[in-house]
Image (spheres, helix red, strand yellow):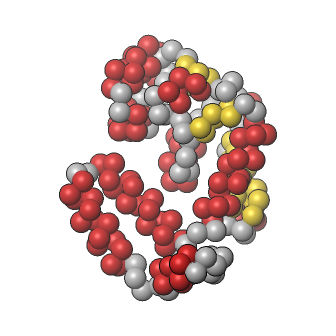
Amino acid sequence: MQKQYDSLKLIKVENVGEFVYKVSLNRPSKFNALNMEIWKLVRRTFPGKVATKDAILSVKEVDIGMAADVGTLNRLPKVVGNHSWIKDICLTARHFSAGEALQFDLLSRVFDTREEMINEVTKMAKLIASKSPVGVQGTKNVLNYARENTIENSLNYVATWNMSQLFTDDLVKASMASFSKQPQPPFSKL
C-alpha cells in the first residue's frame, strides 16, 4: 500500500497502523505553503483540524488583490459561524494564532508541541480506524449533509442512509458486542 504514495511530490504518507496513515506536507522550500493541489487532498481526506500553539494562520488573498478562490470564503462561514470574525481575518489578511482559531471553532484542538499533536492525532485515527467503516463513512457523510441542510431534511437523509447500509453485518455484530460488553468484532470492508 505504501508504494502507491511514493510518487506524491507535495505530501509524505507514512503508514502508522492498520488503516491509519500519517500525512504531512512536503514543501520545505516553500515553508509548506498550501497550493490548489494540496487543498484538494486536504479537503477530501481530513476530518479534524488541529495545530500546535505556535501555528500562525491567515487568509492572504486580499493582500494580492483577489478574493480567495479555493473555497475558503465559501466554507469558513459555514464552519465557524461567526461571520464578523471571518470578515475580520479575510478582509485584513492579518495573521492569527492557533488559540484564536480554536476560540472561533476553526480548529478542534491545539497542542503544545508537534510531537504531542502527532501522538494524539495518531491515537484518534487508530480509534476511528477500529470502528465500522460503514458507520464511520455514514457519520461523516451525514454530518457534512447536516451542515448544509435543515434538521428535517437531515433526519430524512440519515434515515435513508441507514436503511441503505443495512446490507452489512456491522450493525448486528457491533450491537451484540456492545450489549455483552465484548471487544469490537471484525467489520465489513467498504
| Residue 72 position in % (x across, y down) | 42, 34
* Residue 26 visible here: no
Question: How many marks can you see?
Answer: 0
131 w.r.t. 21: above or below? below
For the residue pair 18 and 91, the one nearer the viewer reads as 18
94 w.r.t. 99: above or below? above
Give the residue displayed 38% in from the left and 53% down from the top: 144
Is 63 positioned to the left or the right of 182 in the image?
left
| Residue 47 position in % (x across, y down) | 53, 51
- Quarter of the view holding residue 99: top right
For the residue pair 135 and 71, the one nearer the viewer reads as 135
| Residue 18 position in % (x across, y down) | 72, 68
46 w.r.t. 179: above or below? above
For the residue pair 20 and 7, the one nearer the viewer reads as 20
* Residue 171 visible here: yes
Give the residue displayed 39% in from the left and 55% down from the top: 143
